[in-house]
Amino acid sequence: MKSVYLDHIAATPLLTEVLEAMRPFLGEAYGNPQSLHAAGRRAQEAVEEAREDLAALVGAQAAEIYFTASGTEANNFAVKGLALGQQARGRHIVVSAIEHSSILNSVKALEKHGFTATLVPVDGSGRVDPADVEKALTKETVLVSVMTANSEVGTIEPIADIAAVCRARNVLFHTDAVAAAGSVALEVKALGVDALSLAGDQFYGPKGGAALFVRKGVRILPLIDGGIQEGGRRGGTENVPAIIGLGRAARLAARDMEARRAALVPLRDRLFDDLPRLIERVLVTGSRTDRLPHHASFCIEFVEGEAMLLSLDMKGVAASSGSACTSKALKASHVLLAMGLDHATAQGSLVFSLIDGTTREDIDHLLEVFPPIVDRLRRMSPLYTEFLKERGS
């Protein structure tokens, strides 16, 4: 049976060149970067080289990059560290209604300690209106966090415009760029952001390798207290192999981004064109224009995402339904509900995410096996039966 993996928004494969860069630090080069001997210096030099490669990917200074263990940690670090660092000025935070759970739950944690928060709505494509952000700002607002792109619907947000609104009001702005970094060009100075989160497993790097950019001069309190690592802003012995892999993946992403985009966009757009043609009552979710190049998302009416995923898996196709951090929650996505979809439609969410190695044959296989799956599941669906009755079929 042919195997087709289309769940790369959850994680991408580790490139051979990335693994080879990591390999010495998984074995003989095991020195601690904080040690003063030669083995420690070798590890420290490699970590700093990775920091420079990651900084180059987003147009930052190396000293503005802080390594973390995941995108979730980077988001926690940003929201909690930035908000607490500015609490003398105010205790109000603004975030969009479609943020990742690591942002929303960080805000909830701060609310238990006296902060207040405002959720900004999105339109039907999942886009945040900068004017809505501006309306949400108060004299107490110290932080705004809006993601660069949404992993469930692929929409890329107008980050530079939102940052300009925040800058005009002297409010710090953080963006969760985990879903976007390495796939679309990001220049922190051009965007005007004060902080940006990213993770290497989204651009062919290792799990456990992630980082937070914090603009020089911005006050942020540590999330993890400890020693002098990461300039005293994140304690704990560095995960040297993951950091090395993250840096090498960043270097390759900067080199190959445009070629990857050119290869993936036609395959992505074929899904947009052909799935609604082959299956009735299919809704494309997210923006068709301002969108991640490797991301196609849909809602299939009258069937549930879980049933489709399991059926696709039996045909050798791996896909996802919503965020990997909530895919087993078996409830409607807060992102799709915020976009105005009803619960029943939102339950039929599917996401297909591609990589550089995805082929036309892979898409052919999906388009061949998926329509019969939907047809079988709909024949068992009381919602579809009611729809046919109303339509007179």
Image (spheres, rainbow, N blue to C red):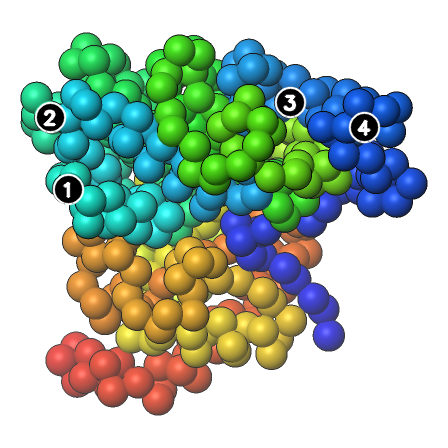
Asked whether the residues under the numbered discs 4 and 3 touch, taking CB atoms below 8 Å apart as contact, a structural biologist would say no
User: Residue 185: horizontal and vertical position, in percent?
Assistant: 51, 23
Q: Amino acid at mark 1?
A: Gly
Q: Where is residue 263, by image quadrant?
A: top right
Task: Give the residue number, with chain letter if any, for mark 2.
Answer: 140
Residue designated by label 4: 40
Between discs 2 and 1, the one toward the N terminus = 1
Identity of the amino acid at label 4?
Gly
Residue 370 location (% of width, % of height)? 51, 70
Q: How far apart are the two marked residues, 3 and 2, measured between alpha carbons?
A: 34 Å
Mark in the foreground, 3 or 2: 2
User: Residue tagged by mark 3?
Assistant: 51
Q: Could you tell me if the residues under marks 3 and 2 are in contact, i.e. CB atoms within 8 Å? A: no
Secondary structure at badge 2 equals loop
Distance of label 2 from label 1 (alpha carbons):
12 Å
The quadrant the N terminus occupies is: bottom right
Label 3 SS: helix
Q: Is residue 384 above or below residue 156?
A: below
Amino acid bearing label 3 = Arg
Left or right: 214 as drawn, with respect to 170: right
Q: Is residue 85 visible?
A: yes
